[in-house]
Image (tube, rainbow, N blue to C red):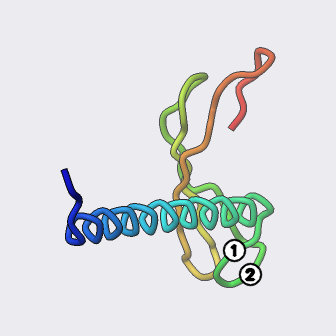
């Protein structure tokens, strides 16, 4: 059984596309985590003012994840994050 050049190129193209998608997703998750750190410090990633407030949080309880929505009172920037709300040492954390 011989492998043709077409098959090799097809495999190479597929691996390149999959690798690019994985890299893009990892970059997105990293950037989203960086934005969450800035927001949790109280600063808006868009206007750099200390005007971020927790607008809404849903779900979670003491297990799973919680959807939290932060909003800037100065420029109107809004972003949502899924954060771990698991219990540690009998106390729930955001």
Give the quadrant of residue 14.
bottom left
Residue 38 drawn at (x, y percent) = 75, 66
Q: Residue at x 70, y 64 (%)?
A: 34
Whether pointer 1 and pointer 2 mark residues with C-beta atoms closer than 8 Å, the reply is yes
Q: Residue at x 28, y 71 (%)?
A: 9
Q: Residue at x 42, y 64 (%)?
A: 21
Q: Residue at x 40, y 68 (%)?
A: 16
Disc ID at residue 79: none
* Relative horizontal placement of residue 52, taking residue 89 as reference (left or right): left
Residue 28 drawn at (x, y percent) = 54, 65
Residue 76 drawn at (x, y percent) = 55, 77
Q: Secondary structure at mark 1?
A: loop
Mark 1 neighbour class, 10 Å CA radius: few under 14, some 14 to 19, many 20 or more: many
Distance between the alpha carbons at the discs numbered 1 and 2: 5 Å
Outermost residue, front side: 1
| The C terminus lies in quadrant | top right
Residue 48 drawn at (x, y percent) = 74, 81
Q: Secondary structure at mark 2?
A: loop
Q: Nearer the viewer, residue 73 or 35?
A: 35
Tag count:
2
Seen in the picture, residue 88 relative to 51 is either above or below; the reply is above
Q: Nearer the viewer, residue 65 or 9?
A: 9
* Relative horizontal placement of residue 6, taking residue 92 as reference (left or right): left
Query: What residue sits right under mark 1 in the picture?
Result: 44
Query: What residue sits right under mark 2 in the picture?
Result: 48
Seen in the picture, residue 7 relative to 47 is either above or below; the reply is above
Mark 2 neighbour class, 10 Å CA radius: few under 14, some 14 to 19, many 20 or more: some
């Amino acid at each position: 059984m011989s492998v043709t050049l077409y098959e090799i190129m097809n495999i190479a193209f597929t691996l390149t596309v999959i690798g690019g998608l994985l890299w893009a997703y990892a970059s997105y998750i990293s950037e989203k985590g960086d934005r969450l750190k800035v927001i949790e410090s109280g600063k808006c990633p868009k206007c750099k003012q200390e005007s971020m407030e927790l607008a809404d949080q849903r779900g979670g309880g003491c297990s799973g994840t919680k959807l939290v929505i932060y909003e800037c009172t100065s420029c109107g920037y809004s972003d949502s994050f899924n954060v771990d709300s698991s219990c540690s040492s009998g106390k729930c954390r955001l």
